[in-house]
Image: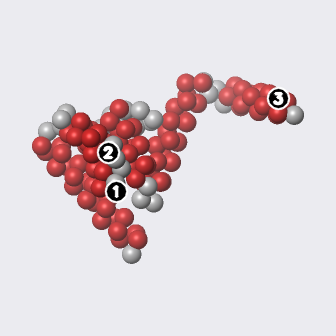
Amino acid sequence: MGTDYTQGVTEMDSAWNREYCISPAVAADITEDMLVAESLAAAAQGDCTAYFDLGVAYSTGSHGAACDLIEAHKWFNLAAVSGHEEAAACRSEVADEMTAREIAEAQRRAREWLAASTRKAA
């Protein structure tokens, strides 16, 4: 039964991709975009692993996120403040590539995120 089901799902996926002209590369992009969306949703709930994952995505320009060191620093900062063990080191590495003005902007964005999260919780 498992093989028939798997084969049926694979055939259905292929037919759907052909019908809507979605290439494997586009399907992969959609999956990666969903990873960032899921991490943002988890971050909104205060998940420090999601903060870290977003820092990685923005620092590397992966998973559907554009490379943005200010955003990366913000997310690594939030993860570090929340107790994530690797986040402080990653924040430091990103900061080495940033200007003082960019770091200040990242810190401002992190404070805004925390303030907004506090208002939602209240």
Crowd rating for badge 2 (residues with CA inside 10 Å; few <14, some 14–19, many 20+) = many
Residue type at mark 1 is Ser
Q: Earlier in the sequence, mark 3 or mark 1?
A: 3
Kindly indicate whether the residue at mark 2 contacts the one at mark 1 (C-beta within 8 angstroms): yes
Sooner in the amino-acid sequence: mark 3 or mark 2: 3
Local secondary structure at mark 1: loop
User: Which residue is at the front of the view, 85 or 60?
Assistant: 85
Residue under label 3? 3
Q: Amino acid at mark 2?
A: Ala
Quarter of the image holding residue 10?
top right
x%, y% of residue 87? 32, 45
Is residue 65 visible in this depiction of the protein? Answer: yes
Single out the mark in the foreground, 3 or 2.
Answer: 2
Q: Residue furthest left?
A: 100
The quadrant the N terminus occupies is top right
User: What amino acid type should be assigned to the residue bearing mark 3?
Assistant: Thr
Q: Kindly identify which residue carries mark 2.
A: 87
* Residue 102 figure quarter: top left
